[in-house]
Image (cartoon, rainbow, N blue to C red):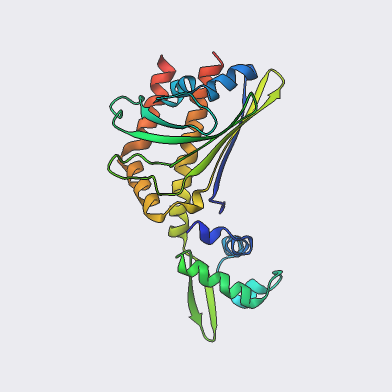
Amino acid sequence: MGCMTDTIEKRTFLRAPRGKVWRAISDSKQFGTWFGVAFDAPFTAGASLRGTITDPPGYSHLVFEIAVVALEPERYFAYRWHPYAIDPNVDYSNEPTTLVEFELAESDGGCQLTIRETGFDKIPEARRAEARRMNDAGWSEQAQRIEKYLASS
Amino acid sequence: MFAALGDPTRLAVVLRLCADGPQSIAQLSDGAHVTRQAITKHLTALADAGLVRDSRHGRERIFELEPRRLAAARSWIDQISLEWDEAIERLRRFVED
């Protein structure tokens, strides 16, 4: 059984030019398109942005913040955010954040993408319990709806 | 709870309890590269975090994992992990069209 809990790491091969994938990740507008969020500013190193959930519809009251840590063209993008910070009545600003990193590498016929989120071991237990409640309330169901919506559009 | 798993020795103890089931401190110390006192300290930290529990068998204390607590920790990470999988598939459709 896996007992590592601090890090999530995903590696995937994307059949698309590296430049195109880079724009999809580093341009806040494009990022928002596939992630389902509208950001109020472009991603620039050191910037703090506010994002509003656009997809699924009906969640636009949920605003979250991300702080851009680094942008290295066509190679590396990193930001910090509060994982699962989706309760509009809670102020998350004093809680620890997780670091999300995107790494791109050239590969035959496309590019290799690594996404890594670290820092979960610093997140308070109360928040994890809340996240589980959110999940029980149908968050994963919403995610499946997004899948279906995008697959049919 | 996550911090309780952050130390490599502590994680090794948990992995050993995962793999071999309930054990005494003597058994856990056997073959470990740290002292019995260190193992005891780590077990205490894990017990405080609710990740292991102990019971007395005669003069020995036997430690075992608290599987529900561990599963709860996993399910939160698993959920976020699943959402990344879904986000990646949306990204794939976005860039591969």
Q: Is residue A98 above or below residue A47?
A: below
Residue A8 image point, x, y percent:
55, 42
Question: x%, y% of residue A37?
Answer: 40, 26
Q: Quadrant of the C terminus of chain A?
A: top left
**Residue A47 to residue A19: above or below:** below
How far from the left and from the top, in percent, is residue A152?
A: 41, 16
Query: Is residue A17 in view from this perspective?
Result: yes
Q: How many tags in the picture?
A: 0
> Where residue A110 sits in the image (x, y, percent)?
66, 19
The residue at the point 52 percent across, 72 percent down is B44
Name the image quarter holding residue B14: bottom right
Extreme residue in the bottom direction: B59
Question: In the figure, A24 relative to A88: above or below?
Answer: above
- When the figure is inspected, residue B85 is found, relative to residue A149, above or below; the finding is below
Q: Nearer the viewer, residue B75 or A40?
A: A40
Residue nearest the viewer, comparing B70 with B41: B41
Q: Residue at x 46, y 20 (%)?
A: A29
Instruction: Pick out the residue farthest to the front.
Output: A46
Is residue A16 visible to us here?
no
Q: Quadrant of residue B10?
A: bottom right
The residue drawn where x is 69% and y is 69% is B32
